Image: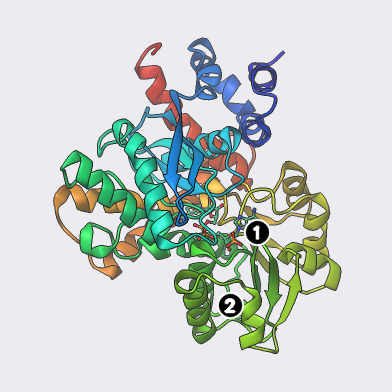
Amino acid sequence: MSVINDVIAKVKTKDPQEREFIQAVEEVMHTLEPTVAKHPEFVKAGIYERIVEPDRTIMFRVPWVDDKGNVKVNRGFRVQFNNAIGPYKGGLRLHPSVNLGIIKFLGFEQIFKNSLTTLPMGGAKGGSDFDPKGKSDMEVMRFTQSFMRELFRHIGADIDVPAGDIGVGGREIGFLYGYYKKIRNEHTGVLTGRALEYGGSLVRPEATGYGAVYFAAEMLATRNKDFKGLRVAISGSGNVAQYAIEKVNHLGGKPITLSDSSGCIVDEEGIDAQKLAYVQDLKEIRRGRIKEYSEKYPKAKYYDGKSVWDVIKEQGLKIDVAMPNATQNEINEELAKGLVKAGCFCVSEGANMPSDLAAIKVYQSNNFLYGPAKAANAGGVATSGLEMSQQSQRLYWSREEVDQKLHGIMKSIHKQCLAASEAYGQKGDYLTGANIAGFVKVAKAMLAYGIV
Ligand code: NDP
């Protein structure tokens, strides 16, 4: 049995209930097959076995009191997966679906993504099954303070630097950092995604969405195309979706969809800057539902309980580019086939693992330009890395400077993916290229340390 199959089998036996983690391990490990023959030293040092086992898994109780005085208890997680190339780095997710398997899949993916950014960051992820939807600001504050009351002892500017993810935006980072500062009595770069007033970086809020569009633009250029006039389907309506829309508009494309967990909208006239400003107010300030978009703009259609990908398949919508920007496993085989029928030829993943393994096969067999999450959405963590650099230098860079660096990093990730795919015999396969390029750097660092 090859070492790759052996590692996958062991993960399945040890953690059979961790569905998403097993999926992520399978996706990465199969593409690493060409590294086995080329690097016998990795096999000898047990790198493949070691890289699927987190350095450390922290799980804790998060008790808090709601506005009515009831005691509530959630479960908190921080999985510090691998710090071979730098301090642990990865977001915190607050969503009722959060469990250990989801946090482990996200932490595992983060190792390779962070390596690809070219910056010195290890991989980690954390969060809780707390649902911020429908909670008051004070409830969110009490929860995040209780969460930090345990997390603070495991993190630090040179140890582990968390950031935002689903359900963790500016408000939550503010509460988390405020409480950390209070109990540690220090002002350091321990969290990223902060507001400008207390150590944040310009362009960090935009970075993941912008980056995924920059990556798509690089892929399009390999076929002498650009965004001008292309119809773009975007799912989600949070941080990543909003700034993907902004950048698609900048580049002359036409974003036509948005969604949340209740349903989706299709706006054939395009979601322009003015409509986007409405969505940002709706989602970030009023914390409303995407359904309200079709009440404000009656020409847009709302589909209750449907995802963007359901509607494309069922309504025969025509699209060129798909950007899944909501959550994992949004697109399965059937929905991917719907994309093929819709005329789509490019997928750039803003969300983490939004396409399942069968969907990826459909993209590959139809010669899609397929930008996998760990390459396409790495702009967020890369800009978090730039925020850390600014913090340590006590300097702030201009918007143009950060955006230029972000753009340069996305181009470099694209180049690394192509170069690795070619060097390992899978030319043009961005998934294999991203996994191998991310892995080899981490594996070499692990090798240098001996067996630790
Ligand atoms: P937000 O919380 O800002 O937005 C998430 C969006 O996705 C919301 O519209 C939400 O709808 C929707 N959504 C979440 N879960 C589900 C679900 N189970 N089913 C349907 N819709 C869902 O998160 P972000 O925009 O930050 O994150 C989106 C994706 O991008 C995630 O996969 C995240 O891991 C990834 N990502 C984010 C980065 C960042 O910098 N923020 C960096 C790299 C990746 P609703 O409001 O109804 O829940």
For label 2, being within 8 Å of ligand 1 is answered: no
Location of residue 202 in the rendering, given as x and y in whole percent from the top left corner: 30, 65
What residue is drawn where x is 44% and y is 39%?
63
Q: Quadrant of ligand 1?
A: bottom right
Image quadrant in which the C terminus is located: top left
Cβ atoms at labels 1 and 2 below 8 Å apart: no
Who's the residue at 15% across and 42% down the image?
185
Query: Percent x, y for residue 196?
Result: 25, 64
Total tally of numbered discs in the picture:
2
- Indicate whether 156 appears above or below 97: above
The residue at 59%/81% (across/down) is 271
Which image quadrant for residue 405?
bottom left
Camera sees residue 5: yes
Q: Name the one closer to the observer, 177 or 314.
A: 177
Choose between 89 and 360: the one closer to the eye.
89
Task: Classify residue 1 by image quadrant.
Answer: top right
For residue 383, above or below residue 74:
below
Look at the numbered disc 1 and say if its residue's Cβ is closer than 8 Å to ligand 1.
no
| Residue type at tag 2 | Gly
Query: Local crowd at mark 1 within 10 Å, few (<14), some, or many (≥20)?
Result: many
What amino acid type should be assigned to the residue bearing mark 1? Val
In this rendered view, identify the residue nearer to me: 241 or 94.
94
What residue did someone put label 1 on? 347
Q: Position of residue 396 (x, y in %)?
A: 19, 61
Q: Which sits earlier in the primary sequence, circle 1 or circle 2?
A: 2
Mark 2 lies on a secondary structure that is: loop
Q: Secondary structure at mark 1?
A: strand
> Residue 208: percent from the left, percent from the top?
46, 59
Instruction: Give above or below for 210 relative to 83.
Output: below
Is residue 189 in view from this perspective?
no
Label 2: which residue?
Answer: 253
